[in-house]
Image: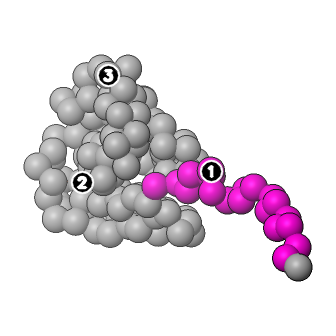
Amino acid sequence: MRQPMEKLPPDSSANQSSPQRRFIQVCQYRSCQRFNAEAVLTALKQHTSPNLMVAASSCLGQCGSGPTVRVVPDNIWYCRVHPQDVDEICAQHIDQGKPVKRLLHPRFHPDYNRLLQRLESQNEAL
Ligand code: FES
């Protein structure tokens, strides 16, 4: 005689969304180096997160507003980043998916609310 199947408890991991993996490029070319881009890169590399990869890049074409930092796949551009900004970028953007408003490059991100809407629709599409 078959025993009735026990009902399994709900899979608690099924509904948890894992943080999105991100790749950060930090310009290490001339103009950005003059404004301490190497220290920004070093500070980012000290953050250990399975959701974060960091690499130096050549000129990202935003030389007048460096150090320039670009986050993909969000395609977020930060300008005039200082080493002391790195903790905030990691805690707010990398871990929570919300870009740091005060560091956004205004050429690429003139409207913060529109940016948040774009990111939200991208995340829904994933
Ligand atoms: S030197 Fe950094 S963006 Fe051009």
Q: Quadrant of residue 40?
A: bottom left
Packing grade of label 2 (10 A; few <14, some 14-19, many >=20) is many
- Which residue is disc 3 drawn over? 114
The CA distance from mark 3 to mark 1 is 27 Å
Q: Quadrant of residue 49?
A: bottom right
The kind of residue tagged 1 is: Asn
- Which residue is disc 2 drawn over? 32
**In this view of the protein, can residue 69 be seen by the observer?**
no
Q: Residue at x 32, y 22 (%)?
A: 114
Q: Is mark 2 within 8 Å of ligand 1?
A: yes
- Which stretch did the figure color magenta? 2-20
Circles 1 and 2 in contact, beta carbons < 8 Å? no
Q: Residue at x 53, y 69 (%)?
A: 50
Image coords of residue 100 (percent x, y): 45, 36
- In the displayed structure, 3 sits above or below 91; it is below
Image coords of residue 113 (percent x, y): 38, 20
- Which residue is disc 1 drawn over? 15
Instruction: Please state which of residues 104 and 13 is positioned toward the viewer in this rendering.
Output: 13
Magenta: main secondary structure equals loop
The CA distance from mark 1 to mark 2 is 42 Å
- In the displayed structure, 63 sits above or below 5; it is above
Instruction: Please state which of residues 20 and 60 is positioned toward the viewer in this rendering.
Output: 20
**Nearer the N terminus, badge 1 or badge 2?**
1
Packing grade of label 1 (10 A; few <14, some 14-19, many >=20) is few
Instruction: Please state which of residues 53 and 119 is positioned toward the viewer in this rendering.
Output: 119
